Amino acid sequence: MILSYVLKNFRRRKVRTILMILSLMVSTGLIIAMSATVETIRRSNVDLISSSIGRYDITVSKTDISPDPFVDIDSVSQAILRSDSEIQQVYPRIVADVELAANGETATASLIARQPAEAELVGLVEVITGTLNLQDGSVALFEATAETFGVQVGDTVNLAYSFPRPREEGQPTVLGTSQRRVTGQYPVSAIVRQTGVVGAFVEDGIFMDFDVAQGWLGIPGRASTLISLVDPSLYESGNSEEAALTVRAVAVNVQAALGDQFSYTLDKAVILDASAQAFLILQALINTYGLMAFGVVGLLIHTLVMTNVQEQRREMAILRILGSQQNYLFAIVIVEVFVIGLIGVSLGVGFGQLLTQYAVLPFIENQMANEGLTVTIQPVVSWTTIVPSVLSAFAVLFISAFKPARDASKTKVMYAINPGVADNIQLEDLAELRESRPNLRLFFVGLVLLFTFIMVIGLDLVSTLGNPALEATFFLSTILLMVTGLGFVFLLLTRPLERVVLFIISFIAPRMTYFASRNVGRNNKRNTLISLLVLFSGVLPSFLATQNAIDFANIRTDVELDMGSPIELRVRSRFAEPGLEQLDWLQPSFITEDLAQFSEIENAVGLTNEYRAEITDAVGMRNTSLSLRGVTGDLNNVLFDQYVDFPTGDRAALTRLVDDHTGIVISEGLAEVLAVDLGGVVKLRGAGLDHIEEFTVIGIARRVPGFDEIGRIRANAQGGSIGLISLPAHQRLSTDPNLPLPDANAKTITRILAAVDPSADLEELNGELRQTFGFSQNLRARISEVRLKQSQDEQQQAQIFLLVLTLISFTTAVFGVFAVIYVTIYARRKEIGMMKAVGSRKWELTGMLIIESIAMTLSAALAGIIAGASMGYIFAYIENVSSERPMIFAVDSTVMPFVIVMVVLASIIGAIFSARRIIKYKAIEILRMS
Amino acid sequence: MTEPIIVVDNIHKSYLMGKDAVPALRGVTLNIERGEFVCLMGPSGSGKTTLLNIIGGLDEPSRGHINIEGEKLVSLTEDKLARLRLDKMGFVFQNYNLLANFTAFENVEAPMVLARVPRRERSDRVMNLLEKVGLADRAKHYPSELSGGQQQRVAIARALANDPPILIGDEMTGDLDSETGFAIMALIQQLNREGMTIVFVTHDPRMSKFAGTVVNMQDGQLFNITKQEAENANDSLLRTQKLPTS
């Protein structure tokens, strides 16, 4: 009986029913698609990582102190295979850095030699030109290498390999020496691209047949590395962390079998382990968006069901007269919503799967291909993805329908007898008046306050539990709370914004705005639901978009402040042990000799290693510690000068510093800590006993690009700041007075800042610097313009992600807007009829309703944007203040206009669609209806 | 004899009730002269409201012709009908049908806005009309702040906004007490004396006495047309006001 009544209701209210089903379908579908995408990527993660790292699991090679750097293939392979049953294959490889010479150019490249059996199984080699037949003694060059050297198929390349001398235990490597050196000349048979053979970061490489390489190096039966492949099912658990730890357990068994003379690397497991956290955060972010989307759908369903109940009041009253129990009326509403939910959610599950398979995954694969990773992702829409979404949808449905159902169950019989007086207090109300019920509204206010309190103290508490998933969820719940709070606060703005919107529209359509402004502005029963719905949907995208826009606008500032100069070279020491890292440091002559070969580099200043010293005022009353860096030249010639800020004195201090061996430039914060002024005296404690030197403060800097530790904040300076001194002063201070001073050209430079000729080809220079110094000097070269471009590309990716999230959050909002406008217009039939009777034409009425809709939704969208953007600016400002960086405030020009366009379009389409039927009727028909 | 302002020629109107056509009007022919005060009376279902709606251009006949000031309504599009209502007719409904979010002033102003009357002229005309219905001091009040009689007077002022030659009233006094009803009829009578053609429907025989012509309907046809000496509504109003209060 209930079901047949419900089905009849569906027929009666086709539009509303379709709207509810569609909104549920779209929101469920989108959430399932998003979750499925994360799940799919998570499960495809092993494949993705394999593509970028190499499709093998454990690498075994000799340690650098081993007398023989090569591994005996047969015995070690057998030992590895025996050590753990999970290891399925072991292949030998020769992987070595060789010198490659061709067409007059010489540089370092990676030689990768492997057996044909491995080549068939591990990774993918794509031939671009030529034929891959390495057994004939030819080599294949990586595409980038062939381009760098200008090598074609058929050309010949010269290879040279220097056998490393083993390092003595406890002693550093002696650079520039080798046991012996072999050379060879090889024809190039193919130019190739690889995925999963070695890491994607290997840009310059040469493939050679394993036997040919063995013969060339003269190491029969031996290899430089053994790669092991474990059972792929170890990764099928779907839990990245668990899989990584299982592989580690296998590696532990291998280590137990082979001993400590081998070194073991598990790059795949390491990255897999690290990615687990990233997926948790991503899933939590999607859950937050999902909750918001369902919240919006809930509001929409609540509105529509409430309208249904009000419309059906007379019928309900008749049913009550006929003897219906209150529970029965309650059930009618709940069953109706449940049936709608069943249809909508089922369709949504299907829609989500289709969306994942045919839209999202091809997009991801395309993005991966752009990154140079060839992977085939299998879509995963598992029960673990579907069930939470479906349960959330039904929970939201029940909550949304509860109040209307309760109202329906309490329908007064007077609605059937005399609707005009039904709202007056009836006899049946008296029982309710006597009832003393707890106030649910107060209960919810209490709940929100409690929740806020938990949020405030909770983060610390949750972090003690050490569960990253819980932390991520908690953090995003805080964001959700912030969005909700902001939404309620900025709801106040919707009224004035409505006036502004109407004022602007009045210039375009004055007559229609005349009516719309009165209806929108003065309606006491206005629907705050529509405002909240749009406002909530607008806050988070605007917040993220503003942050993104500010980040984007400040990329140059960030990169330039971070690097300090157009080119930055840093020593990447191979040693972490104190005392050993200086083996890789550079001599000052490196700047005047090696670096001077590059005509594009105009000026270069070397910075010494950091020497940690105590600094005090003249009498030692105030003291703290700081890191001292010696400079080899005038920093003013290389720094991005727009950022240099000396509030006291001037930047010429950086010039004077080079020749003033008792002068020091300190930060403004440190000057405050020590309470010293320009020209004041400070004392620095140097190496050795009783080694205290007096320095004069010749500059107080607020900001020097490239030196984050120089700032104006006193607390930061107490934590450690940087002092700049001359190179001789640095040498003097860092040397025990009992020892002789080191040679003026001793290795001490760890960082070089340089200026570049603006007309130089920076990409090319970057490549040349990497080629020349990357291996031989362990230098990492960075060029600001190249880094800037990389950062901009990354920001654009983030922008796309943000647009997708906005689209999802607003798709549900659009349904909400649509539904609310529909209900609003439905409720105003009488007024529309009267307007028609008075002489309003169809287009005038449609125009009026469109303007009303736009005013209501656009004002809410603008309020949401203002709320989100304000929060974005506040966050950015706080970050800026704490990091002491200048900041360009930027306005997002993609997501926020997109929000506005979506809202306006939804309003226009919603109003036209909703008004279409009613406006078609004659005035008298409408009046008769109402 | 002057040319009729409203010519109703053999009008038929049927409504579909499920699959059956139920006739509401069966060949009604009626001429209404300019300045005439016509009351349509009859029992429920006699077709008087249907006829009034057709005269007002709110509904269209199934068959037959209707002319308003020489313009054939049947051939007009929906938008042209709207324009005709805006220019030539004013409507007063039983339940006033005022715009709830508009003040009395704005309710009267609304048809002028639709007719593109300049703002300054609108303001003067609205105040004149509100003065005419005795509500100049209630101009800024919303409908919810007015009594039923006051709301109906605002509705009348609104009906007069674009100075139409015809006023159509559907049970104008149906929701009002006698005293207020007589006051409204006195106002309508006054408008008629100023030359406006009035056509209205009522159930109340007391109200029909103020019309010059009473058209009685029955079963969708004209039963009879009675020309009468109209009573002065002001007299009825005065009599009501002299009744002792209990």
Image (spheres, coloured by chain):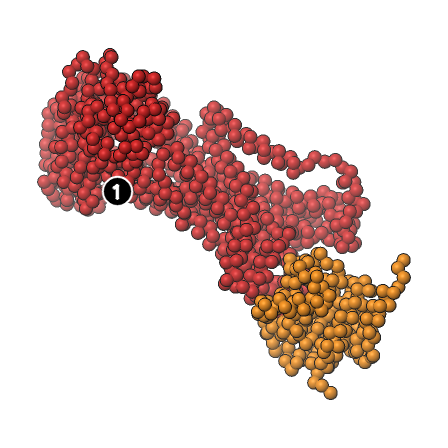
Camera-side residue of A727 and A366: A727
- Does residue A296 appear left or right of residue B143 in this picture? left
Q: Residue pushed farthest bottom?
A: B1
Q: Residues within 10 Å of mark 1 (few under 14, many from 20)?
A: some
| Residue A665 spot, x, y in % from top left | 26, 28
Q: Secondary structure at mark 1?
A: helix
Q: Colour of chain A?
A: red
Task: Look at 54% across and 47% down and name the residue there.
Answer: A493
Camera-side residue of A902 and A51: A902
Task: Look at 49% across and 28% down and name the residue there.
Answer: A459
Visible residue check, residue B179: yes
In the displayed structure, would residue A919 be above or below residue A538?
below
In the displayed structure, would residue B208 be above or below residue A608?
below
| Residue A266 spot, x, y in % from top left | 31, 27
- Does residue A635 appear left or right of residue B41 in this picture? left
- Does residue A96 appear left or right of residue A528 in this picture? left
In the displayed structure, would residue A559 be above or below residue B238?
above
Residue wearing tag 1:
A785
Which image quadrant is residue A693 in?
Answer: top left
Chain at tag 1: A
Which image quadrant is residue A674 in?
Answer: top left
Task: Look at 37% across and 33% down and name the residue there.
Answer: A883
- Chain letter, colour orange: B
| Residue A555 spot, x, y in % from top left | 33, 41
Camera-side residue of A90 and A282: A282
Which image quadrant is residue B182 in?
Answer: bottom right
